[in-house]
Amino acid sequence: MEAIQTTSTADDDEQTTFEPRIVAFLCNWCSYAGADLAGTSRLGYPPNIRIVKLPCTGRVDPLFILKAFERGADMVLVSGCHPGDCHYTSGNYHARRKLPTFRSLLEFMGIDPRRFQMSWVSAAQGGKWSQVVADITALATELGPFEYFERIRDNRN
Amino acid sequence: MPTLTVNRQEIEVADGATVLDAAKACGLEIPTLCHHRGVPSAGACRICVVEATSRGRTRLIASCAYPAEEGLVVQTESERIKRSRKMTLELLLARCPESERIQEMARELGVDTPRFKTENRNQKCIMCGLCVRVCNQVIGVGAVCFSGRGQTREVVTPYKELSDVCIGCGACAVVCPTGCIDPAEFRDKLLERIPNEFNCGFDSRRSIYVPFPQAVPNKPVIDRENCIHFRTGGCGACAQICPAGAIDYEAEDEFTEEKVGAIVVTTGYQLYNPAAYEEYGYGRYPDVVTSLEFERMVSASGPTGGNVYRPSTFEYDDDGKIVGGEKPMVCVFVKCVGSREEVKHKPYCSNICCMYTAKHTMLYEHKVHDGQAFVFYMDVRAPGKNYEQFVRRVAKEKTATYIRGRVAKIFPRNGKMVVWGADTLSGNQVEIDADLVVLAAAVVPSSGAVDLAQKLRIGYDEHEFFNEAHPKLRPVETNTAGIFLAGACQAPRDIPETVAQASGAAAKALGLVVRDEYEREPIVACVDENTCNACFNCEPVCAYGAIGEKEIRDRKGNLVKIVAEVNPGLCQGCGACAVTCRSNSIEVEGFTDAELYAEIDALVP
């Protein structure tokens, strides 16, 4: 319910007040540690991001991403170790093959594929993390509210 | 194994031993000239004669060439032996009156002035042929030989010209008992000196050498590239001489496999090459050295024996050891060479340079009492225990003059190294005529550290220093379980910090391996045996081989079904199997689908 309220507020006010909600699936070893480093290094980044910690990007089930969209996320980010640096040897390779395929499926469904982003941020790249978040938040703001599932719900009602 | 009697003492010697070897084993000294333990004997000089009795017959024999036979009775001291040796020496002394070795031996045996005259006086060569034997039979090249007969017999190179086959190994000069072969004669041919890597190439080493004094294991290694055995197939002197028979030319590098419970990575650091600063001329001017090169010079076991010399004035002996040089009266230390230089070099502070430069100035004062030291610095960073006091002492006792500023250029002029710098505190340009310039180069990770990191799955930063699991709370662990870090592979560190970290890493590693039971992370995958239909799609995605088969049987032992099983000791909990499972039968503890959906629900209400 609240999701609808937030978007409607965004509609009422000017576009600049729209605050996108971004769900990020981060691997525990690189990107989550990178985000942690950004924090301990006192690097600022937009608060629009909500992080789900996973052991590895290989654990990201495409259904999680759909679920996040369904719940009203405006953008989903999957971020993990750089290729070759996976803590679990090959988890990010699984993600790298699987999720871009899923992205084309999103496009087929009519969801703007730009709403699903992937990045590689290592545990030492606090600065890169803050940059990635700033960039995708700017992109999400530009794309505006994501109302795909809402429309489906409204049509059904 | 023949047994013989030497001076009434029974001794058993190895097969193929000579009488000389047997006497040596008895602790007896027999004088020799033409014998060298690395070269086949010929019995040429007849100094080593002894009396040997076999089958009732006593004869004078050359002990170096006579085989130790079963039942031989040997006498090494007698009037007859003495007479024979004196006669031989008298003849040799007549031929070589100026040879020190012959003179010395003659004195020992009581030979004064020889009764014989020779027209061909003042020779040094005693025609023992040791050099010919070593060159032909040991080195295997045959660059010297005998020529002529009788009075005209002499040792020469073929056609009395420097031979093409000579490889300049100098073995002939080394074995010559009277020192009559001068390596200078074939200087052009002499093998190049092999720079001693441990001493930064200041002096030279042999092709078989102990890498450095405290090497572990403290054993010599063979440098195949320079070893004559590997170049010509000859020599083999070290193998013949080694009493333990430890030299094995056939040995190859081999891989050994060990199963271990923990790994401590201590790959250390190396210095940034200051040649990247073209304006400092490192590599072009010998008197511009790195701090590590200076460190070798001030080391008592270093190439100069602890003396500080200008490298451009090093004096070498024949062995390639540094025996002298000019002491630098003005020494300039330049700090932060490569460190804290974001644009072209390394942005980080190398941590150790401030302290070792202060130490270097003090050591320099100890070695060159009336020398003058100048230090160019950006900031003096001395945050350790008593560090500040040490730096203050250096400044207060006027051991060194600290100048705050950078050096712009170093160039030679009239035999000095001119250092152009800035004193930013007074705002003046500084010019110093230095004898020696020491560059405190940045600390960088050892080359090859990245390869190792990729093998061990250790993260590393953009400067290739290894990443710890957490900068504050897990400073000695890596993200890979069981792998620990110590020392400068992680960041530039000084000795106390390294020792502390290494102790921590050792304790962590021990804590892991001494336990009877392994404590694993709780986050592992587990299979729902009710829904698993044994498709084993999970098996290929598991990087750890943790998925196995499990048979489920009823009470009578009949097979009901086969399901996948996760070995919790191997499983690292990455969750790749959970995503792959089509029947949702594998879940990762702590990261189940239900938990994650709930989390998403909570995040996007």
Image: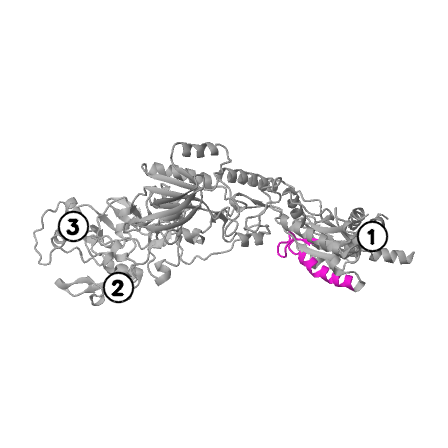
Q: Residue B134: where, in percent of width, then height?
A: 27, 59
Q: Residue at x 72, y 55 (%)?
A: A139
Q: Nearer the viewer, mark 3 or mark 1?
A: 1
- Numbered badge on residue B85: 3
Q: Are marks 3 and 1 on the same chain?
A: no
Residue B542 visible at all: no
Return the residue at label 2: B143
What amino acid type should be assigned to the residue bearing mark 3? Arg
What amino acid type should be assigned to the residue bearing mark 1? Asp
Q: Magenta span has A104?
A: yes
Return the residue at label 1: A11
Separation of marks 3 and 1 at Cα, in angstroms: 119 Å
Quarter of the image where one finds residue B190: bottom left
Q: Are marks 1 and 2 on the same chain?
A: no
- Callout 2: residue from which chain? B
Q: Is residue B388 left or right of residue B592?
A: left
- Callout 3: residue from which chain? B
Q: Which residues are magenta?
A: A78-107
Q: Residues within 10 Å of mark 1 (few under 14, many from 20)?
A: some
Q: Is residue B167 left or right of residue A76?
A: left
- Callout 1: residue from which chain? A
Q: Residue A145: where, in percent of width, then height?
A: 79, 54
Q: Residue B429: where, in percent of width, then height?
A: 40, 44
Q: Residue furthest right?
A: A157
Q: Residue at x 17, y 47 (%)?
A: B105
Task: Find numbered disc 2 in the image and state the secondary structure of the residue it sits on.
Answer: loop
Q: Nearer the viewer, mark 1 or mark 2?
A: 1
When the figure is inspected, residue B387 is found, relative to residue A34, above or below; the finding is above
Of callouts 3 and 2, the N-terminal one: 3
Task: Find numbered disc 3 in the image and state the secondary structure of the residue it sits on.
Answer: helix
